[in-house]
Image: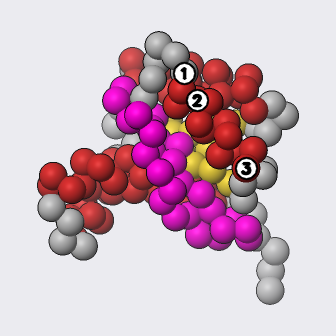
Amino acid sequence: MRVGVDVGSVRVGVAISDGDSILATPLVTLARDAARGADLAALAAIVAEREAVEVVVGLPRHLSGAAGQAAEAATAYADALRELIAPVPVRQVDERLSTVSAERSLAARGIRSKQRRHVVDQAAAVVILQSALDSLPREPE
C-alpha cells in the first residue's frame, strides 16, 4: 500500500492505494499545523498504521517546469516526513495541474464549490498518487 500527499499551506490531502498499488482512493484532509507539526505526526501515524511501503508527495512546479515557493515548501515537508517515517521511502512527483484536475472531476460529479473545498485536497492527493501508481512497472499477465 502506498500513501499520496498533496501539501498545501492550509490543508494536506491524503490518499491511499489498494494493496496491489493499482488504484488510489481519498482518505483524509489534515489541517496544516506548521507550528506544532500535528499534521506530520498524523501522517506518520497513517503510514505506520497502514504499513505503507512508500509515500508519494506532490511537487508543485510551474507550468514551465521551474520550482517556486510552493515546490520548496513541499520539499521541506517531504524532508520532515522522511525523518519521521524512515526507513519508509518518500518520493516526490510532479503534480502540475493536480488541483485543477481534481476540481474539474469534483465539479463534473456535481459537487458544489463550497463542498469541494473540504475534499479537493484529498482529490488532488488521489491524482498525485494515481499518477505515481500508473508509472510503476507491471508484470505482464
Q: Look at the numbered discs 2 and 1 and tell me whether their residues touch, using CB distance below 8 Å.
A: yes
Q: Secondary structure at mark 1?
A: loop
Verify whether residue 93 appears in magenta: no
The residue wearing badge 1 is 37
Image quadrant in which the N terminus is located: bottom right
Q: Is residue 122 above or below residue 74?
A: below
Q: Quadrant of the C terminus?
A: bottom right
Range covered by the magenta-colored residues: 5-31
Residue 40 — which label? 2
Tags 3 and 2 touching, CB below 8 Å: no
The residue under label 3 is 49
**Amino acid under label 1?**
Gly
Q: Residues within 10 Å of mark 1 (few under 14, many from 20)?
A: some
How would you classify the magenta stretch by its main secondary structure? strand
Residue at point 29% right, 49% down?
118
Q: Nearer the viewer, residue 81 or 132?
A: 81
Image check: 63 left or right of 25? Answer: left
Instruction: Report the amino acid beneath label 3.
Output: Glu
The reply to whether the magenta stretch includes residue 20 is: yes
Q: Amino acid at mark 2?
A: Leu
Residue occupying image coordinates x 52% and y 16% = 36
Q: Earlier in the sequence, mark 1 or mark 3?
A: 1
Badge 3 element: helix
- Confirm or deny contact between disc 1 and disc 3 (CB under 8 A): no
Above or below for 87 versus 128: above
Q: Nearer the viewer, residue 93 or 17?
A: 17
